[in-house]
Amino acid sequence: MKIPISLTVNGDKFELLVAPTRKLVDVLREDLGFTGTKKGCGEGECGACTVLMDGEPVSSCLVLAPQAHGKTVVTVEGLESENGELDPVQESFMSKGAIQCGYCSPGMIMTSKALLKLNPHPTEEEVKDAISGNLCRCTGYQKIVDAVLDASEKRGR
Ligand code: FES
Ligand code: FES
């Protein structure tokens, strides 16, 4: 049995039929083609699949697709402006060398976006706390923290 759902992703509305146990991360990646969202552990441990749902960061591997019915989802693809400019957080991740293999980056960036919306000028400790659910195998985290702080400073200019 499949269930009809409708959701808005990056400003576009989608209607589709999904199995009740299908995960939002799989719908985003496989059905809708938003492969910027990564799937790591698939069980809520790594944060690679983080997207914003109604403005809140969620692990999309822990959200069943029917739970996203009627919701507004933003993935990393949704951060780019209409004229193709990167979001300031994306720019800071690049300029601060916070991206190596890049697998964690979309999740890190979406978590950082949520933090900066709630707390535009976080302390280093607050940044570390915010990204504590996002695992990175490559960077040692400091450059990611530096990038979030850099994005925060840009907002203040
Ligand atoms: S893939 Fe969702 S938390 Fe790891
Ligand atoms: S840059 Fe490779 S996992 Fe973070």
Image (cartoon, helix red, strand yellow):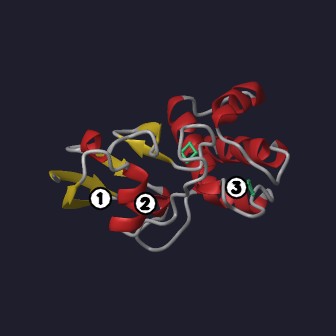
Please give the count of numbered marks on the rendered protein: 3
In the image, residue 4 sits, relative to residue 121, either above or below, namely below
Q: Residue at x 79, y 51 (%)?
A: 137
- Vertical side of 123 occupied by 44: above or below: below
Q: Residue at x 55, y 55 (%)?
A: 39
Q: Nearer the viewer, residue 140 or 144?
A: 140
Q: Which residue is mark 3?
A: 92
The residue beneath circle 1 is 11
Amino acid beneath label 1: Gly
Q: In the image, residue 109 lies at what x, y percent?
A: 60, 50
Query: Are the two marked residues, 2 and 1, in contact with CB atoms closer than 8 angstroms?
Result: yes
Secondary element at image label 1: loop
Pick whichever of labels 2 and 1 is earlier in the sequence.
1
> If you read the primary sequence from the N terminus, does the residue marked by circle 2 or circle 3 appear first?
2
Label for residue 78? Answer: 2
- Residue 28: x and y in percent read 38, 59
* SS type, badge 2: helix
